[in-house]
Amino acid sequence: MPQVKILEEVCKGCGLCCDDVCPVNILILANRINSSGYHPAEVTDNTKCTGCGYCFKICPEPAIEVYK
Amino acid sequence: MKQLFGRPQGLTDVLQRYCPGCGHGIVHRIIGDLLVKLDIRERAVGIAPVGCSVFADEYFNCDMIQPPHGRGPAVSTGIKRARPDCFVFSYQGDGDLAAIGTAEIVHAAARNENITIIFINNAIFGMTGGQLAPTTLPGMRSTTSVQGRDIKTQGYPIKVCELLAGLDGPHYLVRTAVNAPKNIIATEKALKTAFVNQLENKGFSMVEILSMCPTNWGLTPIQSKKWIDDTMIKYYPLGEYRNRAKEER
């Protein structure tokens, strides 16, 4: 099963991955903040991930890793 | 678990000091990926620009030089002629390439130097605080055109791909964007072509990339990527402006 992993300390909370990029819409911005003061992206349901890597491609940091 | 996508070896582990939602990071990642995939990281020499990406020498995991403002194509020419075995890429923004470095880019293209130029076009001066750039759209607000760019006093924007396509020299000119996965995949392909062109000694390749600058545009990152789709691409149409490989076929 493909899995998305967010590196929360690297994420700047821009939200580019959370818009309409994910085909199954499992990425949102979390309510908590990281040590830089940003709301990091969060995966709501990793079982739905298709492993397309679109979130990784649009992440400027990149703070997203995709595993299979 | 096997990693499908992750930070490429062509980038260092340094955290990039760009604003949230900036397009520079996406292009850095693509270049870092290609340096490893084409196995050229050991002999690559990158040219960092003056602008937001002035610290690119800390982010790319290869040899880097930071020349004076706009002189990327001239310095690339020198390195490539002295060391033809090196892979030379010049990473430049619109203030660097289209304002102070216009002479260098035009003459490097006219000479068909065997170098690769990566041109980030975000229609504004980023690092200095959102002033009017040569690429600012007509009517677009910046800190030095608060009523919007007035073409009567500030003139028209420079379309660099169209400008260089008027020369006989360049081998490959293309304009892409990084605002959506579809466009990012096109950018990956264009950059790969531009890199391979240099390895095959084809000549001058330039990839112009429309990129987001949410901070200076005064928009959120999500609004900025929509703004590229709705406004910027209409003024700067995407596509290939020169591809000698296709013309010769």
Image: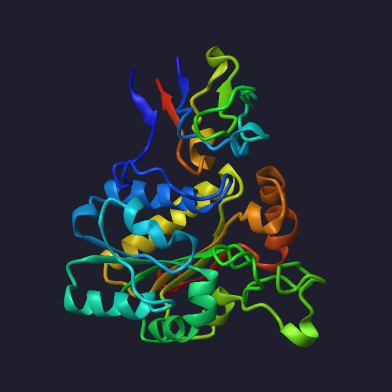
Give how far across and how far down residue B33 sits, in percent: 35, 46
Q: Nearer the viewer, residue B150 or B114?
A: B150
What residue lies at 32% left-to-right and 60% top-to-bottom? Answer: B196
What residue lies at 35% left-to-right and 51% top-to-bottom? Answer: B59
What residue lies at 33% left-to-right and 72% top-to-bottom? Answer: B115
Q: Residue furthest right?
A: B147
Give how far across and how far down residue A56 sits, in percent: 49, 35
Q: Would residue B83 be found to the left or right of residue A2 on screen? A: left
Give how far across and how far down residue B13 sits, in percent: 33, 41
Q: Quadrant where the N terminus of chain B lies?
A: top left
Q: Would residue B51 be found to the left or right of residue B154 on screen? A: left
What residue lies at 50% left-to-right and 47% top-to-bottom? Answer: B185
Q: Nearer the viewer, residue B14 or B60?
A: B14
Q: Quadrant where the C terminus of chain B lies?
A: bottom left
* Colour pattern of the rendering: rainbow
Q: How many marks?
A: 0
Give how far across and how far down residue A28 sits, in percent: 64, 26
Q: Nearer the viewer, residue B212 or B57?
A: B57
Q: Nearer the viewer, residue B36 or B215?
A: B215
Name the image quarter holding residue B168. bottom left
Q: Is residue B15 above or below residue B87?
A: above
Q: Is residue B202 above or below residue B111?
A: above
